[in-house]
Image (cartoon, rainbow, N blue to C red):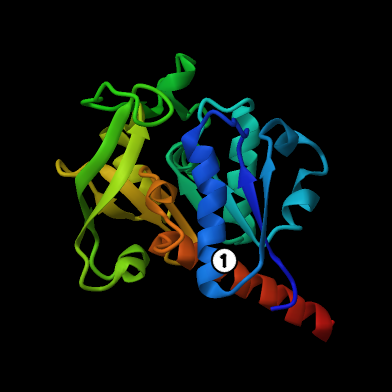
Amino acid sequence: MSNAVRIGILGDFNSEFRSHHATSDSLQHAARKLDLKIESEWISTPSLTASVAEKTLETFDGLWASPGSPYKSFDGMLKGIEFARRRDWPFLGTCGGFQYALIEFARNVLGIKDADSAENNSGSKNIVIYPVACAVTGRLGDAPKLSGMVPEIRLRPGSYLQSFYGKEKEIVTEEFFCNFEVNPEYEWATMEAGFPVVARGEKGEIRAIESPTHRFFIATLFQPQLSSTEKKPHPLILAFVQAAADWERKKLDDSVLE
């Protein structure tokens, strides 16, 4: 391809966060595997509340809601995710990006206007994201959190997510560094909003959701970027980058026909 595939990373880059470096690096792992050129750019969450934010987001071929909550702008992250959902832009959300995707659905699709994360201490009656049931103390990632390798992530057979790992794969191992997860009392909201659960933890906890109707829309509580390497790019990130490249090509073809 002659044109670079542009990926916008929604979040507030922090050089001290391993996950942020891994996010940028994993995109390049995928690009080299797919023989593509990728330009990635971090988009600060406060900038997503600006009047020109949608025009800025339109310049990207894929959007990745990064780890890093609490973000500098709660509303900014929600607006970035809403753009991807409403405009059908290839989207990947990981860790905090997963959490905020659920809040965005609850607020803007289901009309639960005070849907929130317990992390924000807002006093909301609708806490969609709440503290993990059994956090593990450690500092393998950015902070003491539910941390390390979680060996029992069961993929839903027939889901897009499973197809990216390979149809023979039913259980995968990924890294988590999270203090917060989906409140099981709001699990109904994911299906009601059109984003079924496609991966669960050992005790049935929600670990990933996807949209069967969008071009590409997947969000995971785990962080696939942390296990991506130059020699072995993560299959989910490969699929995301390919979807962004396909979208870039379609937009280019459509512009030629106009």
Residue 18, compared with residue 160, is above or below; it is above
Q: Position of residue 44 (x, y in %)?
A: 68, 35
**Count of numbered circles in the view:** 1
Q: Which residue is mark 1?
A: 31
Q: Is residue 66 visible?
A: no
Question: Disc 1 on helix, strand or loop?
Answer: helix
Q: Position of residue 179 (x, y in %)?
A: 35, 26
Quarter containing the N terminus: bottom right
- Which of 230 and 10 lies nearest the eye of the viewer? 230
Residue lying at 51% horizontally and 61% vertically, measured from the top left: 29
Residue 43, compared with residue 230, is above or below; it is above
Residue lying at 39% horizontally and 31% vertically, measured from the top left: 141
Quarter containing the C terminus: bottom right
- Which of 38 and 165 lies nearest the eye of the viewer? 38
Residue lying at 75% horizontally and 76% vertically, measured from the top left: 252
Residue lying at 58% horizontally and 46% vertically, measured from the top left: 81
Q: Is residue 251 visible?
A: yes
Residue 6, compared with residue 42, is above or below; it is below
Q: Position of residue 40 (x, y in %)?
A: 66, 53
- Which of 37 and 153 lies nearest the eye of the viewer? 37
Q: Position of residue 239 (x, y in %)?
A: 47, 67
